[in-house]
């Protein structure tokens, strides 16, 4: 109670002083519009970046005379095929991007000619060649099948699990990298992702979420007796609830079990360390390399009463753009590669285009597809003109086409005066083109003090670099002039038959 009181008091003081990063969003924007967060943490309206286009009711996809009612996962392949996994029916449905059903997988043929079915599966991944990796959860296995429904391999509970008491192997989500390495989220496992070779050999864990214990709690543990420590709360790492993998083999993992208190502290103190986070980008060594250079870390909602955003999936778009799916508030938080919030879309509700219990999100080109288990639908959203401009501007900035980047960011700024990052984008393009003074003006407009200072320092170095050659030339000319003057005096003295004396000695 004392800790909560002190935290609440600190929060209230931050609000009074105007330094808090948390604010009630509902006073600043329409409940129907998109928004972003300003520098002081207030949500402000922006033009809609995405608009609802159409949806498919899963009840219209019949298996054994009944529609699908328990979708558990969705995956979009390289060929833009949409795979829907139904837990109760134990089937995989393949659709094209226009929601036309291409095939329904109800059973799979084993190598001995027998057939096998799925039991409450929760995750599916599809390789470029059409091979499906299915987290067949209640069958306690990973099933690998080709697009002709023939079983290629079955991975069961590893025998060499170290440092974990895993009574049963319950895989829930799965990804595969370009080398065939398999990474798995398993229920009741908080050691990180289980990893297997392409042959199904277990190799260990990767990317375990860290445990956060306050300095006070550490001190109390040191001075407490064994009996007192035994009564204290036991901290264990949280579990990943979903994973995705990008073209560079970085694994993106979402964590929905981060507490409200932890998220509040991240927001309040501007913590960009990533020690507490609902999203991680893991390299092959398991290190989180996600960039967090925005006004606030990518945590979703900045204001909440009891429950923070619950991130259940992440969609990986072009040019480093990614979208986090908030299942609790039914929202889509889209960030660029630096972790800067570009827009917040959608709402929780029953109106057309709104979400109820979204569980998966994926990009198909620039379009967003959301699987909602509560609605029993797949919903498709397309970028608006404003949204397309954002995507184009990021693309030009990443590719180094600074003229087009400048032009596009200018159009973004014209349509959204509340978006400081548009001016940052203009500043970045001017900086890359070497127009430092113009870049500083844009950074000043966006109140981007760090980039402004860096650009000012670069300009000083440039000016110093341009002055130095002039100074060097002036010194050389001065030496030449003095030398010529001395030679002239020597010659004059010689002609007149006089003895030459240096000026210093002559004065003496």
Image: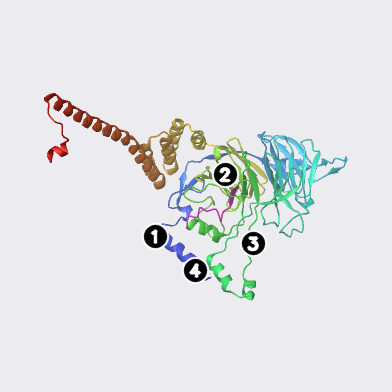
In magenta segment, residue 277: yes
**Which of the marked residues, 1 or 3, is nearer the chain's N terminus?**
1
Camera-side mark, 4 or 3: 3
List the residue tagged with mark 4: 5
Q: CA distance from mark 4 to mark 3?
A: 25 Å
Residue 118 showing in the rendered view = no
- On whether residue 192 falls in the magenta region, the answer is no
Residue 13 drawn above or below residue 170: below
Q: Quadrant of residue 16?
A: bottom left
Residue furthest out toward the top: 495
What's the residue at 54%, 57% (across, down)?
263
Residue range in magenta is 269-281
* x then y, percent, for residue 202: 74, 49
Find the distance from the CA under tag 2 to the CA under tag 3: 28 Å
- Sequence-first disc among 4 and 1: 4
Q: Residues within 10 Å of mark 2 (few under 14, many from 20)?
A: many
Cα distance, mark 4 to mark 2?
35 Å
Rendered-image quadrant of the C terminus:
top left
Ranked by sequence position, the earlier of labels 4 and 3 is 4
Residue beneath disc 2: 323
Name the mark on residue 17: 1
Judge depth for marks 1 and 3 and give the one in front: 3
Q: 158 above or below 80?
A: below
- Mark 4 touching mark 3, by CB under 8 A? no
Instruction: Compare marks 2 and 1 and give the one earlier in the sequence.
Output: 1
* Residue at which label 3 appears: 236
Secondary element under disc 3, as helix, strand or loop, is loop
Q: Position of residue 462 (x, y in %)?
A: 36, 37
* Residue nearest the viewer, comparing 9 with 185: 185
């Amino acid at each position: 109670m004392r800790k909560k009181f002190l935290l609440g008091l600190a929060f209230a003081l931050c609000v009074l002083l105007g330094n808090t990063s948390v604010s009630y969003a509902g006073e600043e924007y329409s409940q129907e519009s998109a928004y972003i967060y300003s520098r002081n943490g207030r949500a402000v309206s922006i033009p809609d970046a995405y608009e609802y286009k159409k949806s498919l009711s899963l009840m219209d996809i019949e298996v054994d005379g009944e529609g699908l009612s328990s979708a558990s996962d969705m995956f979009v392949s390289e060929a833009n095929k949409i795979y829907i996994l139904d837990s109760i029916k134990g089937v995989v449905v393949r659709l094209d991007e226009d929601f036309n059903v291409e095939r329904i997988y109800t059973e799979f043929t084993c190598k001995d000619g027998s057939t096998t079915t799925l039991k409450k599966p929760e995750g599916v991944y599809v390789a470029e060649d059409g091979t499906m990796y299915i987290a067949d959860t209640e069958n306690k296995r990973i099933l690998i099948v080709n697009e002709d429904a023939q079983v290629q391999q079955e991975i069961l509970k590893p025998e060499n699990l170290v440092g974990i008491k895993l009574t049963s192997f319950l895989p829930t989500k799965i990804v595969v990298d370009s080398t065939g390495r398999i990474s798995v989220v398993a229920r009741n496992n908080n050691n990180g992702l289980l990893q297997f070779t392409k042959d199904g050999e277990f190799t260990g864990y990767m990317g375990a979420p860290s445990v956060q214990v306050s300095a006070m709690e550490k001190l109390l543990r040191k001075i407490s007796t064994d009996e007192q420590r035994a009564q204290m709360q036991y901290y264990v790492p949280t579990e990943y609830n979903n994973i995705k993998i990008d073209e560079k083999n970085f694994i993106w993992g979402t964590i929905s079990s981060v507490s409200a208190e932890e998220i509040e502290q991240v927001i309040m103190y501007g913590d960009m360390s990533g020690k507490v986070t609902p999203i991680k980008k893991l390299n092959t060594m398991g290190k989180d390399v996600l960039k967090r250079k925005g006004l606030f870390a990518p945590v979703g909602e900045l204001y909440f009463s009891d429950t923070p955003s619950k991130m259940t999936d992440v969609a990986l778009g072009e040019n480093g753009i990614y979208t986090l799916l908030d299942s609790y508030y039914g929202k889509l938080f889209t960030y660029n590669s630096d972790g800067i919030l570009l827009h917040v879309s959608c709402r929780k509700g029953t109106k057309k285009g709104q979400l109820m219990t979204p569980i998966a999100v994926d990009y198909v080109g620039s379009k967003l597809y959301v699987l909602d288990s509560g609605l029993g639908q797949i919903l498709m959203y397309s970028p608006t003109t404003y949204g397309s401009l954002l995507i184009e501007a990021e693309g030009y900035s990443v590719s180094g086409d600074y003229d087009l980047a400048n032009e596009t960011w200018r159009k973004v700024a014209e349509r959204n005066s509340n978006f400081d990052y548009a001016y940052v984008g203009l500043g970045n393009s001017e900086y890359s083109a070497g127009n430092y003074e113009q870049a500083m003006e844009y950074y000043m407009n966006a109140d981007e003090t760090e980039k402004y200072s860096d650009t000012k320092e670069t300009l000083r170095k440039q000016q110093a670099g341009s002055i130095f050659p002039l100074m060097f030339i002036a010194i050389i000319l001065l030496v030449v002039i003095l030398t010529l003057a001395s030679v002239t005096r020597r010659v004059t003295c010689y002609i007149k038959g006089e003895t030459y004396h240096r000026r210093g000695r002559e004065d003496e």
